[in-house]
Image: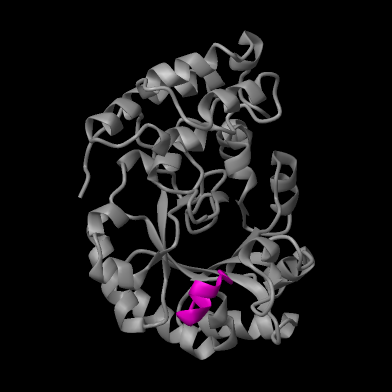
């Protein structure tokens, strides 16, 4: 289990009444769990941009934790906190055992995936499938809460094919909430399990934000977080007028710099003295450690491709770091790429 210190400082804990936090002390902004994206290398990069935002792991199945390489699956750098471990599975006892194992790693909360529509997940009868069986989902969340004193939360869709109405979503939420769950992250699209792949399920079913807003109005005692095609700071601010928290998905990966002003805008922190060039150079020590462990620099560099998204020099930056890379150290690769970006772009401050 990794306890390695880094050049980044751990985030300061905030009181539950602090600006930017829900009544239970959870950050009001988060980055969605995304397979192949929100790994520990991305999360380390992200923490050079925002310290307050709640981060999630990629979904990890309970079976993988119980039977697999636990350090590879669960270890993380302390700077990545606050951090939630998202779990997938349909066996209450196995998920409880996975949480007992994960407890030693220091996660801040545990989240149940009830939203993923992939064929692999459907074959395992978990993810979005669990919306069809609220009572079974409740058995899982009961087991999870019995296995930890940390918060247990649920991320789900507004429905699935065949169970698409607001009333059916409310039935699911009420059934699970009866076990003691108090925070729900709601992806404001249904998941169509028959006929659409995960990418199509992120785009084709229409967004129904009003259903999420209604859920918060009708269940004010619950903490409701909204997710689904939210891609800017103004959009986050607008959604927060109706719900407790906002989760950002692909935009947080494709344009990670959008979070550079989040700690100031939503959490009241002083405007950070950072720019993209400083963030790049803050990664040099991390790359050195990766290489010392025999890991390729691409583990981190791939996550940095969108750092200059939408700005002059972004294309040249991506070209310099894509394809077959020269046989150079990670820091030298980044220095070469930085040299292709105009100085005024490199030196731009946080986005507000």
Magenta segment, which residues? 116-127
The residue shown at (73%, 58%) is 242
Q: Is residue 271 visible?
A: no
Considering depth in this image, is 308 or 165 the residue closer to the camera?
308
Please report the residue visible at 51 percent of the width from the left and 27 percent of the height from the top: 321
Q: Residue at image x 65%, y 58%?
A: 227
Residue 258 in the image: above or below residue 247: above
Q: Give the camera-side residue of 112 and 150.
A: 112
Q: Nearer the viewer, residue 14 or 170?
A: 170
Q: Quadrant of residue 331?
A: top left
Q: How many marks?
A: 0
- x and y percent of residue 33 in the render? 51, 56
The structure residue drawn at horizontal position 40% and vertical position 38%, both measured from the top left corner, is: 299
| Corner quadrant of residue 78 | top left
Left or right of 206 in this view: 173: left
Residue 307 versus residue 186 in the image, above or below: above
Q: Position of residue 274 (x, y in %)?
A: 52, 20
Residue 107 in the image: above or below residue 287: below
Q: Nearer the viewer, residue 103 or 91?
A: 91
Q: Is residue 247 magenta?
A: no
Quarter of the image where the C terminus is located:
top right
Give percent across and percent down for residue 168. Answer: 68, 85
């Amino acid at each position: 289990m990794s306890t390695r210190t880094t050049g980044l400082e751990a985030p300061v804990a905030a009181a539950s009444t602090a600006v930017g936090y829900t009544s239970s002390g959870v950050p009001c902004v988060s980055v969605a769990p995304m397979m192949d994206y929100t790994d520990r290398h991305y999360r380390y990069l992200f923490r050079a941009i925002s310290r307050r935002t709640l981060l999630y792991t990629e979904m990890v199945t309970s079976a993988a934790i119980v039977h697999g390489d636990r350090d590879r699956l669960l270890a993380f750098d302390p700077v990545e906190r606050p951090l939630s471990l998202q779990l997938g599975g349909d066996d209450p006892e196995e998920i409880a055992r996975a949480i007992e194992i994960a407890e030693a790693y220091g996660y801040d909360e545990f989240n149940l995936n009830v939203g993923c529509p992939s064929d692999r997940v459907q074959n395992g009868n978990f993810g979005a499938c669990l919306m069809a069986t609220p009572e079974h989902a409740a058995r899982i969340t009961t087991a999870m809460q019995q296995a930890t004193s940390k918060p247990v939360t649920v991320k789900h869709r507004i429905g699935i094919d065949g169970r698409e109405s607001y009333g059916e979503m409310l039935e699911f939420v009420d059934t699970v909430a009866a076990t003691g769950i108090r925070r729900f992250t709601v992806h404001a699209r249904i998941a169509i399990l028959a006929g659409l792949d995960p990418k199509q399920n992120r785009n084709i079913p229409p967004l129904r934000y009003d259903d999420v807003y209604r859920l918060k109005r009708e269940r004010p005692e619950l903490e409701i977080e909204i997710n689904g095609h939210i891609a800017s700071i103004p959009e986050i601010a607008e959604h927060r007028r109706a719900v407790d928290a906002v989760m950002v998905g692909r935009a947080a990966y494709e344009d990670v710099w959008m979070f550079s002003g989040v700690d100031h805008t939503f959490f009241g922190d002083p405007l950070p003295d950072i720019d993209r060039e400083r963030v790049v150079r803050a990664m040099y020590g991390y790359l050195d450690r990766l290489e010392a462990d025999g890991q390729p620099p691409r583990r981190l560099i791939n996550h940095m491709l969108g750092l200059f998204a939408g700005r002059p020099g972004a294309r040249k930056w991506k070209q310099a770091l894509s394809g077959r890379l020269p046989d150079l150290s990670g820091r030298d690769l980044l220095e070469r790429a930085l040299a292709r970006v105009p100085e005024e772009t490199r030196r731009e401050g946080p986005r507000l």
